Amino acid sequence: MAEVTGVEALHWNPAGVVGARKRQVAFSHLNYIADVAMNSFGATMKVKGDIALGVSAKVLNVGKIYVTTEDNPDGTGETTSPTFSVFGVTYSHQLIDRVSFGATIKYLNEWIKRETAQGMAFDFGFQYAPGFKGIRFGMTLRNFGSGIRFDGPDLDHNIRLPGADPQSRNRSTRTVLSQSELPTSLELAASFDLYNTKMNRFVWTLAFRNNNMSEDEYQTGAEYAINDMLFLRGGYARAPKAKATPSGFGKQFIFGPTFGVGVRLPVSASALAVDYSQSFNDIFTDSKFLTVRFDF
């Protein structure tokens, strides 16, 4: 988050988008927990030497869920596949040689059966490189917005209003759901070049994330780059308090260490990069993340 640049910065820190020297396009697929999958797309380009723009899209598919009712607790035979989508436009500006700023405006759309919810959210980010031994700092505020509310025809009911004449007809009413708060987070990070030569580079990152809807997280990660072609990565994140929960899972934070590898291959004046990572999970199957990026 402190040193991320280019198309990857669309998610982690929009301030880093301007750090890429070329145009970039990336496609990603994430196999998340419990058969949940997410596909994402991003593209960035510089419009000036100190200004860059980007667009992004993410679609999260929860998979098939069996529909149950009070009369049919074992299922009605129907299934539904909730889908959650986010579309963003990013502006990134190199304010001075050591400081960059970025902002993303996002359109949110969530769909469950015939109910939908739409809203807007913003991401803001800063990066600062003091120019001392490869130290960099970053700050990101994600999903800043007013929240969203579901609405749709499945919330309609045909009932007799309280106190109405018994001979009167039923009236059509709609249940109004309460607004759902967005999962906002504030992240602070720092990265350090522990080793940096023309052929090899070893980077270490520390981060703290404050979440409004879950436990805060401490994160650390490292990357070893060989000739800017082969990348070996590892990371670990943990909530500060791990304790028993009513669900019996035993921990509030279920993710363990993460490992990854990346390859970047020059193609004429362009480059093709493929990255794979895997996050170990205490309860569900491990999460697997694959990204293909093209620099041109």
Image: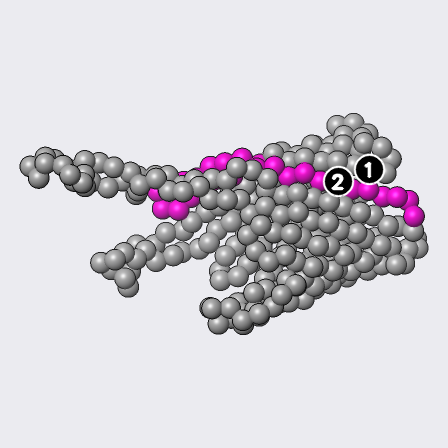
Residue in the foreground of this view, choosing between 27 and 266: 27
User: Which residue is at a point 47% across and 68% down the rendered structure image?
Assistant: 246
Residue 227, above or below 268: below
Residue 271: name its quadrant. top right
Q: Main secondary structure of the magenta part?
A: strand
Asked if marks 1 and 2 touch (Cβ < 8 Å), the reply is yes
- Is residue 72 something one can see in this rendering? yes
Left or right: 46, with 41 as reference point: right
Considering the image in quadrants, where does the C terminus appear?
top right
Amino acid at dot 1: Val
**Residue name at image x 40 percent, y 51 percent:** 81
Q: Which residue is at the front of the view, 181 or 268?
A: 181
- Seen at 82% across and 37% down, the residue is 99
Secondary structure of the residue carrying numbered label 2: strand
Whether residue 270 is visible to the viewer of this picture, yes or no, is no
Of labels 1 and 2, earlier in sequence is 1
Per the image, the residue denoted by label 2 is 126
Task: Tell me the distance, in whole angstroms, between the alpha carbons under discs 1 and 2.
Answer: 7 Å
Q: Position of residue 229 (x, y in %)?
A: 81, 54
Check residue 99 in the rendering and tell me which mark sits there, or answer none: 1
